[in-house]
Image (cartoon, rainbow, N blue to C red):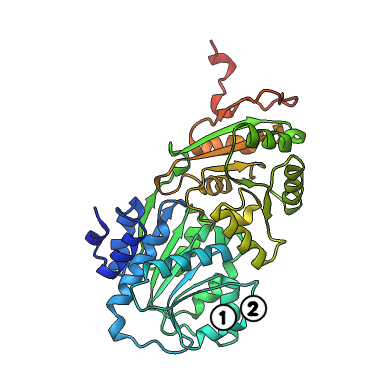
Amino acid sequence: MSFSTLNLSKPIVDAITDLGYTEPTAIQKKAIPVVLSGKDLIAAAQTGTGKTASFVLPILEQLHTKHNEHQLRGKRIRALILTPTRELAMQVEASVSQYGKYLNFSSMAMYGGTEIQPQKQRLIWGIDILVATPGRLLDMAHQRVLHFDELEILVLDEADRMLDMGFIDDINKIIERLPEKRQNLLFSATISDDVRALAKRSIYKPVEIAIGKNSASEPKINQWLITVDKGNKSALLSYLIKEQAWQQALIFIETKHGAAKLVSQLEKRGIQAESIHSGRTQAVREQILNEFKSGKIKFLVATGIAARGLDIGALSRVVNYDLPDKVDDYIHRIGRTGRAGASGEAISFVAKDNFRNLCAIESRLGHIITRKEIEGFPVKKTVPVSILNFVPKHKRV
């Protein structure tokens, strides 16, 4: 199947062909026709499945079809895409610009942590497609520099993450301001009870699709773990980087203090690294992310702020230096690699204190994560066998 068979017009097909897209992914095959039909949609799709294009492409097509019928007014928008983080807002807006480069549409990423005046200025003439974080969007609405009376389409992207970050009140306030007659699209890696409750309040008789429910366990991501005592983790990481000649890795850690400390420890062993966390300014974070994407920075230590919304393309390796407390966070972290059919590697450091988290992760995946031993790093506090391997005494042979 080609993109042209999905009823996308030539300017859009030409733009995605320029990007090297040849065949739609599973989520794109299912979602694009639904969106083009004008129906509401709830879609469960993991990161790396091509979900951004699955809503951006048909939105562009719909706005293009109605272009001659609509004269955009100042301080108005036609499509709103809500995202949980600044990084994801910038990424999605970049996709809008790329996919719509042969169309005469305006787009903008709006987020906090940066000067508000330039964003106000951009809104004066109106924006066709606005990608925004909830907090900054509400600020603009309260200041009456943005009105929603001409909105046609609402997208809630990574809805589960927005709820996890405590945006539910902001989202409800935004939805209250929107016209009742609109198309609603909700995309989420997981469809929790909270996500369903949000959908019930904001979406009318939606079509539901689910893609890649267990994509984290697919062969394209080679997952393995090393059991290690807490005090040996930085030495182990340094050893792996050097002995296995790693070229690049995204390393996840729980705290910004821990991130700074790990960067310092790596540098003492001759490994240059950088960190990204909520304590760094937006400008610094953007610069570091761009340098990591370009390969100038080879090892990036990140707190959960980068777990979603970070699209690096051919990232070969993710390391869970700290195993996350939530299974969904593990899924999203390793989803940074093995994207769009490419192969990737996900390595986790597991200490005895992480055993419960490990069991939860392996239960979600439905399989045991391969354990590897590294010579020279004996473990004093043994990590028990996973519950998936547990055999009751009366059944043991």
SS at mark 2 in the image: loop
- Residue at 59% x, 66% y is 167
**Nearer to the camera, 91 or 315:** 315
Residue 323 appears in the figure: yes
SS at mark 1 in the image: helix
Give neighbour class at mark 2: few <14, some 14-19, many 20+ (Cα, 10 Å): few
Residue 246: which quarter of the image? top right
Question: What residue did someone put label 1 on?
Answer: 119
**Quick check: 101 above or below 22?**
below
Q: Are marks 2 and 1 in contact (CB under 8 Å)?
A: yes
x and y, in percent, of residue 126 in the image: 46, 85
Residue 375: which quarter of the image? top right
Question: What residue did someone put label 2 on?
Answer: 115
x and y, in percent, of residue 176 in the image: 50, 77
**Nearer to the camera, 35 or 339:** 339
Q: Amino acid at mark 2?
A: Glu
x and y, in percent, of residue 47 in the image: 47, 52
Residue 146 appears in the figure: no
Q: Amino acid at mark 1?
A: Gln
**Nearer to the camera, 209 or 26:** 26
Give neighbour class at mark 1: few <14, some 14-19, many 20+ (Cα, 10 Å): some
- Residue at 49% x, 61% y is 197
**Mark 2 → mark 1, Cα distance in angstroms:** 8 Å
Identify the disc placed on residue 387.
none
Does 87 sit left or right of 20 as displayed?
right
Q: Residue furthest top?
A: 397
- Residue at 76% x, 52% y is 257
**Quick check: 349 above or below 262?**
above
The number of numbered discs placed on residues in the rendered structure image is 2
x and y, in percent, of residue 95 in the image: 43, 65
Does 176 sit left or right of 61 as displayed?
right
